[in-house]
């Protein structure tokens, strides 16, 4: 996994910086609703090379303030319960160590289907593990991740994996041709809560997700949450239709429960020629290997 950067901070030790990589669901098949209220899903997770930025032990954060949130989407989560501090509390309860102080540079939109708080929590666990010399895929760390949310274990690994069950029964998948593909994320600047989207699923099992090369599997797959998400937010089908018409697009789909959509491109030049409307949020990146 990518080493955590260490940045000297004026004689007060060092800060450790970790990226909370944006998640995309290449495919998401909903198979049934479970007795515990969750849905049985089959999904292919992949991750962008970019995302929120989390800094551990930043000198600008006082001892009494475990988390300071900055960045373009800070206002959307300021003052609420945050998975970064919950992750740090669970980690410390199990493994000890000093209290952690963080700065979260919130660059990804909130309630957007691309990881959000799950990716931030996973980044907190990774950077704490690195501080303490623990492997980032340690089973104990994965157990904590699972307690924080269904997407957090996948976000902890932040590489191409298949998720079954709630999405937290993970199986590593060789990236194949997917690795390094140019990626464009686009959100119409509308939040969309996960609960109403799942509640809008029509209950029809349209079949399993295949195995194989993830790009080929995704091309023949679907996101079963697209129809209910599009019904709730009519901006989403507009973004999807627009992405699908861009030259060089290999695959265009909504991620997770929306409202962010993504496009994979055959080359970076094709991606970079796309002019995204100013009213939409966008992130140009590549798929992590």
Image (spheres, rainbow, N blue to C red):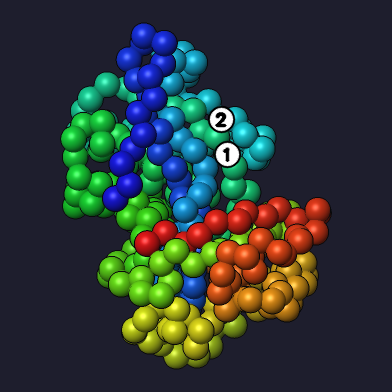
Q: Residue at x 58, y 64 (%)?
A: 268
Q: Residue at x 52, y 42 (%)?
A: 52
Measured as percent of width and height from the top left, residue 26 is found at 49, 72
For residue 106, the mark is: 1
Measured as percent of width and height from the top left, residue 142 is found at 26, 52
Q: Quadrant of residue 258?
A: bottom right
Measured as percent of width and height from the top left, residue 93 is found at 25, 32
Residues marked 1 and 2 touching at CB (< 8 Å): yes
Instruction: Answer with left or right where residue 263 lies relative to residue 30.
Output: right
Whether residue 215 appears in this view of the structure is yes
Instruction: Answer with left or right where residue 8 lies relative to residue 65.
Output: left
Which circle's residue, 1 or 2, is located before the other in the chain?
2
- Secondary element type, mark 1: loop
Relative vertical location of residue 32 with respect to residue 193 in this rendering, above or below: below
How crowded pointer 1 is (Cα within 10 Å; few <14, some 14-19, many 20+) is rated as many
Q: Nearer the viewer, residue 10 or 159?
A: 10
For residue 120, the mark is: none
Placement of the C terminus among the 4 image quadrants: bottom left
Measured as percent of width and height from the top left, residue 224 is found at 55, 79
How crowded pointer 2 is (Cα within 10 Å; few <14, some 14-19, many 20+) is rated as some
Q: Quadrant of residue 78?
A: top right
Instruction: Answer with left or right where residue 69 lies relative to residue 102.
Output: right
Disc 2 designates what residue?
69
Q: Residue at x 44, y 43 (%)?
A: 19
Q: Nearer the viewer, residue 165 or 199?
A: 165
Q: Residue at x 19, y 40 (%)?
A: 134
- Secondary element type, mark 2: strand
Which residue reaches farthest front?
269
Whether residue 169 appears in this view of the structure is no
Instruction: Answer with left or right where residue 100 lies relative to residue 114.
Output: left
Q: Nearer the viewer, residue 46 or 193?
A: 46
């Amino acid at each position: 996994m990518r080493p955590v950067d260490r940045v000297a901070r004026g004689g007060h030790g060092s800060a450790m910086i970790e990226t909370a990589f944006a998640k995309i669901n290449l495919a998401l098949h909903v198979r049934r609703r479970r007795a515990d209220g969750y849905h049985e899903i089959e999904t292919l997770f992949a991750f962008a090379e970019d995302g929120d930025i989390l800094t551990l032990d930043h000198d600008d954060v006082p001892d009494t303030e475990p988390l300071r949130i900055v960045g373009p989407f800070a206002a959307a989560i300021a003052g609420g319960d945050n998975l970064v501090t919950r992750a740090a509390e669970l980690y410390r309860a199990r493994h000890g160590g000093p209290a952690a102080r963080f700065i979260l540079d919130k660059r990804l939109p909130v309630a957007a289907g691309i990881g959000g708080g799950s990716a931030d929590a996973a980044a907190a666990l990774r950077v704490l593990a690195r501080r303490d010399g623990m492997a980032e895929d340690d089973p104990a760390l994965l157990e904590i991740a699972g307690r924080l949310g269904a997407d957090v274990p996948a976000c902890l690994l932040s590489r191409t994996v298949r998720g079954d069950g709630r999405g937290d029964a993970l199986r590593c998948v060789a990236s194949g041709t997917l690795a390094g593909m140019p990626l464009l994320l686009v959100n119409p600047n509308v939040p969309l809560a996960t609960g109403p989207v799942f509640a809008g699923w029509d209950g029809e099992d349209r079949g399993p997700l295949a195995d194989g090369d993830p790009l080929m599997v995704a091309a023949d797959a679907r996101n079963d949450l697209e129809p209910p998400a599009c019904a709730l937010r009519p901006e989403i089908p507009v973004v999807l239709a627009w992405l699908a018409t861009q030259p060089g697009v290999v695959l265009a789909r909504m991620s997770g429960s929306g409202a962010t959509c993504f496009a994979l491109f055959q080359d970076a030049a094709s991606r970079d020629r796309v002019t995204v409307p100013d009213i939409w949020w966008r992130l140009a990146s590549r798929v992590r290997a």
